Image: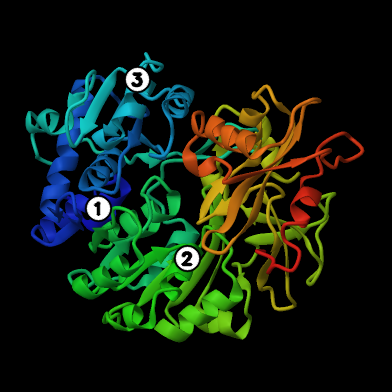
Amino acid sequence: MSLDRRAAGRCGMTLAWHAREVPDQPAILSPAGDRSFDQLNARANQIVRALRVRGLRAGDRVALMCSNRPEFAEVYAAVQRSGLHLIPINWHFTGPEIAYIANDCNARALIGDVRYAEALTEAAAEIPKTDVRLVVGGSLAGFERYDEVLERESTADVEDAEHGSTMFYTSGTTGRPKGVDRPASFRSRPGLALVAKHSAYRRGEDLNLCTGPLYHAAPLAFSLAGPLTAGVGVVLMDGWDSEGALALIERHRITHTHMVPTMFHRLLSLPAAARTRHDLSSLRMILHGAAPCPIAIKRALIEWLGPIVYEYYAATEGWGSFVTSEVWLERPGTVGLPQSGQVRIADENGGALPPGEVGKIYMRAPPEDRFAYHKDPEKTHDAYDASGEYFTLGDVGYVDEDGYLYLTDRSADVIISGGVNTYPAEVDAVLLSHPSIADSATIGAPNKDWGEEVRAVVELKPGIEGTDALAHELIAFCRERLAHYKCPRAVDFVSALPREDSGKIFRRRVREKYWVGREKRI
């Protein structure tokens, strides 16, 4: 297949175009192996053919649970050119959590990293319709070996390429993750186009350091898809290490990276000798989002590395705003100036609010790029305003007289720990299944390293005593049933949880006492 770049983009073959232009240029550098653009493209073609031989067709879904290694990029590139839908799965998930997502999205294939063999094996027993199973990095009973499967297929570019898409599962306020369905599109979404403009990638010169797990939307978009689309290679970290990140920046002359505020805090906490030991002068962009960043932390980072820190306000569902260091320093705390008509602030009845007044933040969803929550029309309906043109994540904020957006609160319940979202309802559901618990209110409590930590505040059944032993038992109970990052780090016992008139737990009141005298996270 020989296409110009624009035509290649329309059918998900931009990587193939770069492979033709700069075949030997590094595309992926990682502890698990490297790939040139030519090698990455060839492997993507092989996985497309391997999946087709096993019966997958455009529109089918491929669940992928893989660490930050070249195979993740190969599968992503294959999906982009085959009309398939990629479902990245958090590799902290337990077997039942994996099975829930695979069944919910009707995944035809599951590709898993042998590193997570126990969870994958447990999940496989519960997903009978997911009959194509491949394992990366080793052998696993019931799974075909990924490398052996690819070896049988041609590396030639597929002739009938069709643009695919990715569906991420977000934590759900009702306790179960929900898939965010967005249309497969070759069009450049406004937010991504804005980031691309400021990235100003130079093929053959730049490299992006991927610091976060690729199952997250932001690292996948900004530290894999974005640079590869521009013909720029990616250095994958297999887990965060503060000084290790600085060493990689120096060694590879990294120009771009995406981080979350917890990483900023860890970097700034390094001894002065460690921070000055490495040459970081190659860096031109540090992009961040995912969690609110304390003003003092961001200011200190800019003072250290210069005005190369860029922030966005967005979510899997859509785009909000973007801000450079220079503008942020003039208006500390802003998350940027939204494009005209992109954001509106509304009162509880949906009425527009004037500048300076705090209300719910709504973001515009273009008709051609509207999202829907998979199999949940009610949740989808509730996310949009009466016009159907704007959606909300439940975040609260205001715009100033010049239109700059500020966040004053977050969706009422979500806990953001180290840039990762946990919704209390899912944790509460597990705790309420324990025989000692009458009621539970899981909240985010201050944590100096992670911003917040998951803490359970529970009401016990009559006759049950709140002891350290019971607290440890409850934490262990959760860890057997949930990904560990979702589980409480501490459990507090109270005689009665505060409630609204409706009987619903007043979670904000539970949370307030933990934040007295603390910097408000947003």
What label does residue 111 carry, if any?
none
Q: CA distance from mark 2 to mark 3?
A: 36 Å
Q: Tag 2: residue type?
A: His
| Precedes in sequence: disc 2 or disc 3 | 3
Q: Is residue 182 visible?
A: no
Task: Please tell me which residue lies in front, 380 or 277.
Answer: 277
Residue at 57% across, 51% down:
366
Q: CA distance from mark 2 to mark 1?
A: 26 Å
Q: Tag 1: residue type?
A: Thr
Q: Tag 3: residue type?
A: Ala
Secondary structure found at label 1:
helix
Q: Position of residue 417 (x, y in %)?
A: 54, 54
Secondary structure found at label 2:
strand
Mark 3, Cα crowd under 10 Å, few <14 / some 14-19 / many 20+, is many
What label does residue 14 carry, if any?
1
Q: Which residue is mark 2?
A: 288
Q: Position of residue 520 (x, y in %)?
A: 69, 66
Residue at 66% across, 36% down:
425
| Precedes in sequence: disc 2 or disc 1 | 1
Task: Please tell me which residue lies in front, 491 or 224.
Answer: 491
Mark 1, Cα crowd under 10 Å, few <14 / some 14-19 / many 20+, is many
Q: Are marks 1 and 3 in contact (CB under 8 Å)?
A: no
Task: Please tell me which residue lies in front, 327 or 139.
Answer: 139
The colour style of the image is rainbow
- Give the number of the mark in front: 2 or 1: 2
Task: Please tell me which residue lies in front, 143 or 370.
Answer: 143
Q: Are marks 2 and 3 in contact (CB under 8 Å)?
A: no
Q: CA distance from mark 1 to mark 3?
A: 34 Å
- Give the number of the mark in front: 2 or 3: 3
Please tell me in which quadrant of the rendered image residue 354 appears.
bottom right
Q: Is residue 249 depicted above or below 477 in this figure? A: below
Q: Which residue is mark 3?
A: 124
